[in-house]
Amino acid sequence: MNLPDSMASSQQRHKDTKGSLRSNRWAPLCLCVLVVHTAVIGRGADVDRLFHDWPDSGATPQEVGRKVTERFLASPHVLWAERGTLSYAEVCVWYGALTFTQLTHDTGLSARLVERLDTLVSREETLIPPVDHVDNSVFGVIPLEAYRQTHAARWRVLGLAFADGQWDNPTPDGLTNQTRFWTDDMFMITALQTEAFRATGDARYLDRAAREMSAYLDRLQQPNGLFLHAPGAPFFWGRGNGWVAAGLTELLRALPESHPLRPKILAGYRKMMAALLGLQGADGLWRQLLDHPEAWGETSCTGMFTFAMITGVRTGWLEADPYGPAARRGWLALGRHLDAQGDIDEVCVGTGAKNDLQHYLTRPRAVGDPHGQAPVLWCASALLR
């Protein structure tokens, strides 16, 4: 196993010091305990300062998350214009709101989110998307998360219908037939299958997600660590890379250390995070096109990268320095773009893949678009975990 340089050097210093204390049979044990205890306390203090000490009360994850959740509950459904069914963008906000209320133990707010689902299923069933496309199938994360919180069997049945339906008639190499190798899919597919695992404990769902993620890493990750939007769209689009970062994070949170694909997936995640460090703007935002300084600062990708880095620092996948300060800058930048109603601005609208630089640089910017609302909630949840 390859250790981070800082950890390896720390262990070498421990080894050298231990050799000089062999005359005392208790010294090695005491020294080991001291080194580990000091490292944990020091790292914990750094993380507490980075992720708890906010410049004003309005920047706390509890307040921001509640404001954005209330905004979601007060808003009408977001639909596919051409299909008339629920958009994946609303699904992502709904999922983020559910995880946030669970972490804050806000049973009243959680009940309202589940009631919205009950209304959808019982009175607005025509808005439920079919299990025929990667962007439609992700709907299943909502009932699966509702099941995890309420233990109502009907939500489990509904959610698994989407997770299992996604793997009807898989490809010869075991991928879903919804595979299209767009960066967006690296969240849409893995989030659904990972939620199915969390709801059931059945490892086949994690295996599906890991196999899919491995194939996408092979196809889309570039030597610099970033991801092309899709075959034929050779651009490092901000939110496209954001979907990857969020999908990798969700999967790694659930994937056990013993899983054979975990080292590859973790390596892909770390390579991406290292690339992102040098691309964050002085204002804390990442750009609409990551490697184009002239591109505007975009909040949805910023939220997704911030979520990935907060989680990485919290779990120990990433070093607290330099990733903690970058995540903190990202969170504070999101707060500056969030208005009193809970709407975030500077959000790129839905964007299809295209081999055209101007297509990405001139995309319209929206306020309160769910593509941007969702990552704010994911960040709030990550800060509270």
Image (cartoon, rainbow, N blue to C red):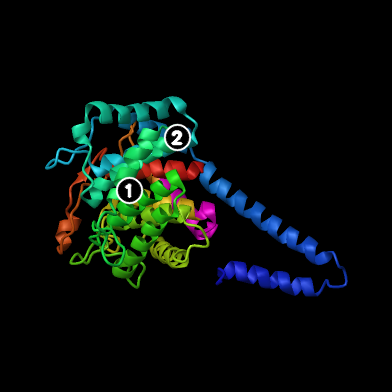
Q: Could you say which quadrant of the image residue 376 lies in?
A: top left
Residue 66, compared with residue 280, is above or below; it is above
Secondary structure under badge 2? helix
Position of residue 276 measured from the top left corner of the image (x, y, whole percent): 38, 61
Q: Main secondary structure of the magenta part?
A: helix
Residue located at (29% from left, 69% from top): 219
Q: Earlier in the sequence, mark 1 or mark 2?
A: 2
Which residue lies under the disc numbered 1? 163
Residue located at (44% from left, 54% from top): 203
Residue sticking out furthest to the front: 169
Residue 108, compared with residue 297, is above or below; it is above
Position of residue 361 measured from the top left corner of the image (x, y, whole percent): 19, 57
At label 1, the amino acid type is Ala
Residue located at (59% from left, 67% from top): 6
How many discs appear? 2
Is 107 part of what is drawn in magenta?
no
Q: Is residue 274 visible?
A: yes
Is 319 part of what is drawn in magenta?
yes
Residue located at (18% from left, 33% from top): 126
Residue 104, compared with residue 29, is above or below; it is above
Placement of the N terminus among the 4 image quadrants? bottom right
Q: Is residue 280 visible?
A: no
In this rendering, the label closer to the viewer, 1 or 2: 1
Mark 2 residue crowding within 10 angstroms, few (<14) / some (14–19) / many (20+): some
| Marks 1 and 2, how far apart at CA | 18 Å
Mark 1 residue crowding within 10 angstroms, few (<14) / some (14–19) / many (20+): many
| Segment tinted magenta in the rendering | 313-332
Which residue lies under the disc numbered 2? 149
Secondary structure under badge 1? helix
At label 2, the amino acid type is Gln
